[in-house]
Image (cartoon, helix red, strand yellow):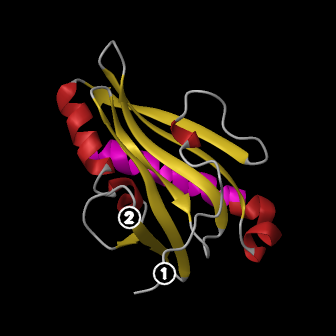
Amino acid sequence: MSPRVNLTYSEVGATLAADELPPGYAHMDRRVRIGSGQECFERAGAAVLSWGAQRGAGLRVTPGGDVREGADVQLRALFLRIPCRVVRVVREPSCVGFAYGTLPGHPECGEEAFLVERAADGAVWFRIRAFSRPGRWYARLGGPVARGVQKWVTGRYLRAVADAVG
């Protein structure tokens, strides 16, 4: 078994904080309304906690199973290897989800959170918050292209969870 490696950034859990995302990174905060009511909230939460956003976006997730805090996972897209660690899992009455951070070898350096939120009026939202900067030479070299790919994948994540709840 290989030794446990450190995350590639220091602001662990910052995507789940109510205040601003950390300076020195590109920021992203997108959400989509996916329905309303307890059943919708539960279905969406179950999808998110079983890697539904990632799988629905076309990524392979290893190991399989549900999201577990502290677990190291590998996302794969074609030839790209994307190592991450689940840094927090959220299970609250009006918010369910998780955040993962980047490990060495990830194209980016930073954190991304996937949250299902239920508002006071019963509306259910799927929200993705992230902060990142290039972590590999090709992400630095690709600059705007890498940001475009990240936006495209984020859109796929949002659609995957919306589709999972019908």
Q: Amino acid at mark 2?
A: Ala
- Residue 53 x %, y %: 38, 54
Visible residue check, residue 95 = yes
Which quadrant: the N terminus?
bottom left
Q: Earlier in the sequence, mark 2 or mark 1?
A: 1
Query: What label sits on residue 71 in the rendered view?
Result: 2
Q: Is residue 46 above or below residue 91?
A: below
- Residue 55 x %, y %: 36, 63
Label 1 crowd (10 A; few <14 / some 14-19 / many >=20): few
Residue at x 68% of width, y 57% of height: 148
Which one is nearer the viewer's eye here, 7 or 111? 7
Which quadrant: the C terminus?
top left
Q: Is residue 52 above or below residue 71?
A: above
Q: SS of the residue at dot 1?
A: loop
The residue segment tinted magenta is 147-166
Q: Amino acid at mark 1?
A: Pro
Residue that carries the numbered disc 1 in the rendered image: 3
| Residue 33 falls left or right of residue 93 | right
